[in-house]
């Protein structure tokens, strides 16, 4: 029987582990399918406090892991498929052939990049299709690429890619960007970025090696189709929270983000807490995820103090 099981090993999960470990709760972290979370797919992180010269995303996560383990947190490389609450208030977690039992659970499973759902899409990831410009942009020097999306993330990706690509097509299904005003203005003023309005990608076209060579565009106003040559497609159309395995233990919004008790990290199920990007669709920053990880740890500790059994 565990006092605390933390599902997820991103900023929220590791911070929750540091706090619960220091409180002598001997937490167990279950890593999930992406150990280290989304920061492992980024390069330099310049806005995490305490690192004035920046720090590489994977290095920051390794330091958080080491800090959690220093205080006694344990990590199991497992992916949770279901969580059930027993009549006695404890939880059973299933991960493949393994099962775990805990008095409290902190959900810190984050969110996964959303894709278009086109045929063959999954096979193209890493072969000219990606959701991370900072990870893969440098591979596409002096060739045309495209970004799909119209929010701040899409604009940031497009702007970053102009350091490498010969041209960046910004494909958006509307005729104005959803991004903040300053971000939209900066993007549209960049001579290497060409907006493609009222359009969506309807097909990925590949070469004989199975790498992306072009995309087919569908105009949403006149239904016309055209083709543009690009060496890579960067998808920036949002994220899907990793909350589907929780069933009705939590309430969710229309996009699947876990609803917390206002001002808290608690969910509708006593003893079950949610922290980070699985519940936060507004800030979505490493530091706010870490803050929620801290909050969830403190709430779990207080819950255990009041429910000694």
Image (cartoon, rainbow, N blue to C red):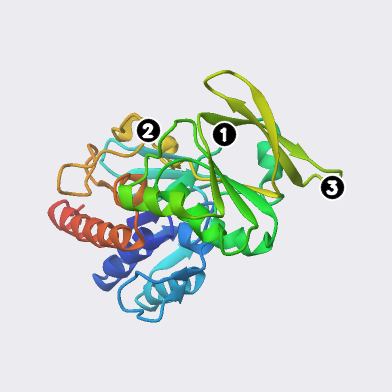
Residue 13 screen position, x and y as percent: 37, 59
Residue 292 lies, with reference to residue 61, above or below; the image says above
Residue 46 lies, with reference to residue 16, above or below; the image says below
Residue 227 screen position, x and y as percent: 70, 34
Residue 234 lies, with reference to residue 172, above or below; the image says below
Please identify the quadrant where the N terminus is shown: bottom left
Circle 3 Cα neighbour tier, 10 Å, few/some/many (<14 / 14–19 / ≥20)? few
Q: Is the residue under label 2 in contact with that under label 3 (CB below 8 Å)?
A: no
Q: Which label sits on residue 209?
A: 3
- Can residue 31 be seen in this snapshot? no
- Can residue 302 be seen in this snapshot? yes
Q: Secondary structure at mark 1?
A: loop
Q: Residue at x 48, y 45 (%)?
A: 112
- Real-space Cα distance between discs 3 and 2? 36 Å
Left or right placement of residue 28 versus residue 274 in this view: right
Task: Residue under label 2, please give it.
Answer: 255
């Amino acid at each position: 029987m565990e006092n605390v099981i933390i599902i997820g090993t991103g900023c929220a999960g590791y911070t929750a582990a540091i706090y619960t470990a220091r409180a002598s709760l001997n937490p167990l972290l279950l890593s999930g399918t992406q150990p280290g979370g989304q920061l492992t797919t980024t390069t330099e992180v310049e806005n995490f406090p305490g690192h004035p010269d920046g720090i590489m995303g994977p290095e920051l996560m390794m330091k958080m892991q080491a800090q959690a383990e220093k205080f006694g947190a344990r990590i199991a490389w497992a992916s949770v498929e279901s969580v059930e609450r027993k009549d006695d208030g404890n939880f059973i977690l299933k991960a493949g052939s393994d099962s775990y039992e805990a008095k409290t659970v902190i959900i810190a499973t984050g969110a996964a990049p959303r894709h278009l759902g086109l045929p063959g899409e999954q096979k193209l990831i890493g072969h000219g299709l990606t959701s991370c410009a900072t990870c893969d942009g440098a591979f596409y020097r002096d060739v045309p690429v495209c970004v799909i999306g119209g929010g701040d993330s899409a604009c940031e990706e497009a702007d970053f890619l102009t350091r490498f690509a010969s041209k960046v097509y910004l494909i958006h299904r509307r005729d104005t960007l959803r991004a903040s005003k300053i971000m939209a203005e900066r993007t549209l003023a960049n001579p290497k970025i060409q907006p493609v309005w009222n359009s969506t990608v309807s097909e990925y076209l590949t070469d004989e090696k199975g790498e992306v060579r072009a995309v087919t565009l569908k105009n949403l106003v006149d239904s016309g189709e055209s083709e543009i040559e690009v060496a890579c497609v960067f998808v920036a159309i949002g994220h899907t929270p990793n909350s589907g395995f929780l069933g009705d233990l939590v309430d969710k919004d229309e996009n699947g983000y876990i609803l917390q008790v206002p001002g808290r990290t608690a969910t509708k199920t006593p003893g079950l807490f949610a922290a980070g990007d699985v519940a936060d669709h507004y800030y979505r920053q490493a530091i706010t995820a870490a803050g929620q990880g801290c909050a969830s740890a403190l709430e779990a500790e207080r819950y255990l103090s009041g429910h000694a059994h």
